[in-house]
Amino acid sequence: MRLSGYRIMWLFTYFDLPVETKADRKAYTDFRKALLKDGFTMLQYSVYIRHCPSMESTEAHIRRIEKALPKKGKVSILTITDKQFELVRNYWGVEHSPSICAPQQLEMF
């Protein structure tokens, strides 16, 4: 089966969680660690991304995020195709930086 930029997905998770109390900070840390454990990469503070080989894989990762949701705060999930992700323009200061490349190795499960 040929890989298609329209089937390969990128999963964005944005969150704004309270950190006022010790319990809030722990919930924030636990959620962040759950994202990292699931293969997400920090794009910016409170913005994490993950490459997924298919929509089915994306749905599995969304279910994992839902299980790790903290009781307070806001979490948003955005799914885009690899073709759409190609159009992202990243800037560090005034310099244009290339988009993050898809991993070379495909997932087997």
Image (tube, rainbow, N blue to C red):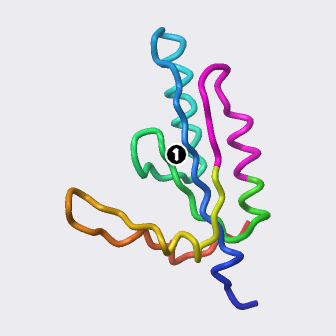
Left or right of 63 in this view: 22: left
The total of numbered circles placed on residues is: 1
Residue type at the position of mark 1: Leu
Asked whether 95 falls inside the magenta stretch, the response is: no
The residue located at (66%, 73%) in the rendering is 8
The residue located at (57%, 43%) in the rendering is 35
The residue located at (65%, 67%) in the rendering is 9
Residue on which disc 1 sits: 36
The residue located at (53%, 69%) in the rendering is 85
Q: Give the range drawn in magenta.
A: 61-77
| Rendered view: 57 above or below 105 | above
Residue closer to the observer: 35 or 20 = 20
Left or right of 94 in this view: 23: right
For the C terminus, the quadrant is bottom right
Residue closer to the observer: 39 or 4 = 4
Residue 53, x across and y down, in percent? 67, 71
Label 1 crowd bin: few (<14), some (14–19), many (20+), radius 10 Å? some
| Rendered view: 9 above or below 11 | below
For the N terminus, the quadrant is bottom right
Residue 80, x across and y down, in percent? 63, 64
| Rendered view: 79 above or below 30 | below
Residue 49, x across and y down, in percent? 53, 54
